[in-house]
Image (spheres, helix red, strand yellow):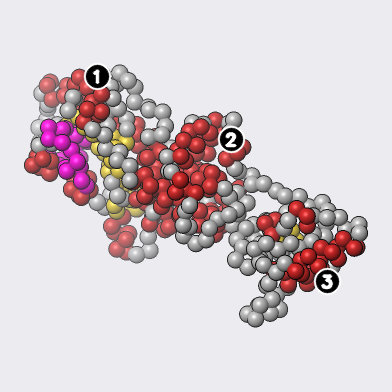
Amino acid sequence: MPSTCCSVPRCSNCGGYVFPKDEKLKKKWIKAIRRNSDKNKYWKPSKSSVVCRFHFKPTDFISETSREKIEDSESNLQNNQTATSQNPVTDSDSQTQTWPALCVEKFEDDPAGMKFYTGLQSHYDFTFVLASLGEAAYKLYYIYFRSERLSVENQFFLTLVKLRQHKTNFELSRLFNISETAVINIWITWINFMFHQWKEINIWPERDLVRFFSPYNFRRQFPTTRIIIDGTECPIRKPRSPIAQQSTFSTYKNRNTIKILVGATPGGLVSYVSPSYGGSSSDRQICESSRLMTICDHGDSIMADKGFNVQDLFAPYDVSINIPTFFRKKNRMTCKSVMKDRKISSKRVHIERIKWLAKTFKILKEPLNIVETKLATDITFVCFMLCNFKNCIIPGNA
């Protein structure tokens, strides 16, 4: 079937059946899909114009060996004038339905393929993550129109493929056999839905749980550590506005970026993801805007990199900061300071592993376009939340 968009008004599906060559039958088709309105009175189908398979019934696919059968089908077509359920007769008995090149059903017994396209370990994990979104996933209000072409499972699959492989909307439209508009409609709707649905979950664990699931060496050396934090940046395309260019330009990356603050427990659970900020924002500014000070308990400690010189922000809440020692114009460090810094660095590396795991989703490594930049807070949160559904990469004896 041709891959052009369906000619039926308000239908965005791709592919379908070309108009018949017989002029009388072609006029029946044109009348049935209601394209000859007052605004478009003289519309004529081109050689590539099609009507998608969703406007046909199985009984419409008949042979042309009998002229009487064609006339009967034409009369049925004339009586059914609704644009959403037309019953036109094809002019060929060799046309068959086609299925998307990419769909989740093909990976039920292919864990390697599932991991490649979605980052999840298996089809079972895929089903589990979808179930975590609840029944609301089957009752969504879409940004443009309700998508009937793809099942809920394949809409979720498309969203994960977009995050994992960062494919263009055009490529996804061809892989899933839908229009680019339908891809955008599904993508924006689902990324918003996943963000707000998972945002309702309290991912900040209690102090006792953090300590219980901490690796043995970590628990022995830094028993009060509640969270390990670090900043990370994701590239974006250069904005047109000079003000936006200035606010998103990162001197560290020497390009335009968005910046977030990420926190994980010593056991490897992502427990905090901040909203996204412009790349020019400092770690201190983001930390000051966060709510970490209020959600930590008295006596907790936070492990961070040297750039997080924010002890004064947490001191009023009786929360300490474990960071490497500053030189402060000294040309040498004491043996005790060196040993302490080594211990902190060996444990702080866990957050680097989490960041690496999140950036296996290519959307966080490749420049975000304008639409994706506006959704940066949603996208980053969803990617880091998906890390919590993966196998833990923190060794038990770390």
Q: Nearer the viewer, residue 390 or 124?
A: 124
Q: Amino acid at mark 1?
A: Asn
Which residue is located at x 46 percent, y 39 percent? Answer: 131
**Disc 2: which residue:** 107
Q: Is residue 33 magenta?
A: no
Disc number placed over residue 24 in the picture, else none: 3
Spatial CA span between label 3 and label 2: 45 Å
Helix, strand or loop: magenta stretch? loop
Q: Nearer the viewer, residue 189 or 345?
A: 189
Disc number placed over residue 217 in the picture, else none: 1
The image shows residue 383, relative to residue 124, as above or below, that is below
Residues packed near mark 1 inside 10 Å, few (<14), some (14 to 19) or many (20 plus):
few
The image shows residue 346, relative to residue 23, as above or below, that is above
Left or right, 281 with reference to 319: right
Residue 262 picture location, percent across and down: 29, 40
Spatial CA span between label 3 and label 1: 82 Å
Mark 1 vs mark 2, foreground winner is 2
Range shown magenta: 290-311
